[in-house]
Amino acid sequence: MEKEKVQTSLNAIRPALQADGGDVELVEITPENIVKVKLTGMCGCCPMSQMTLKSGIERFLKEKHPEIKEVQSV
């Protein structure tokens, strides 16, 4: 899986995160197609961050890239 394509997809949802004072950073994509991201800013300490990660970021990335197995926060 190409890191650039996943980064482009993250850039598409970044404005929504930034509107709430947060952001997301792509850390790595494992050989098993697990995408590891770091939630920063307000997203890093928000109690709803896991919901944002799974219901927002992971769902969006899987729609764009069906080969992704999971998105994890590191």
Image (cartoon, rainbow, N blue to C red):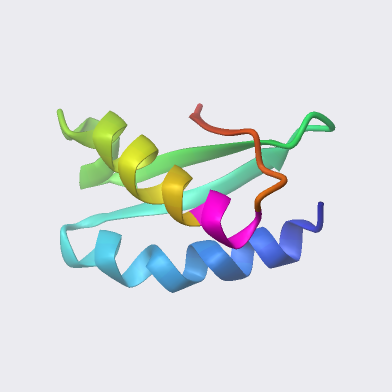
- Number of callouts in the render? 0
Identified at 66% across, 42% down, the residue is 68
Is residue 38 rendered to the left or right of residue 64? left
Q: Does the segment drawn in magenta span residue 60?
A: no
In the rendering, at what x and y percent does residue 59 appear? Answer: 44, 47
Taking depth in this image into account, of 36 and 56 the one nearest to the observer is 56
**Rendered position, 41 above or below 14:** above
Identified at 45% across, 72% down, the residue is 12
Identified at 49% across, 69% down, the residue is 11
In the rendering, at what x and y percent does residue 70 appear? Answer: 58, 32
Is residue 58 rendered to the left or right of residue 44? right
In the rendering, at what x and y percent does residue 17 appear? Answer: 28, 59
Identified at 65% across, 56% down, the residue is 65
Is residue 38 rendered to the left or right of residue 52? right
Q: Quadrant of residue 19?
A: bottom left
In the rendering, at what x and y percent does residue 40 appear? Answer: 35, 44
Q: Does the segment drawn in magenta span residue 63?
A: yes
Chief secondary structure of the magenta portion: helix
**Rendered position, 52 above or below 11:** above
Is residue 46 rendered to the left or right of residue 22? left
Residues in magenta?
Answer: 61-65
**Rendered position, 60 above or below 74:** below
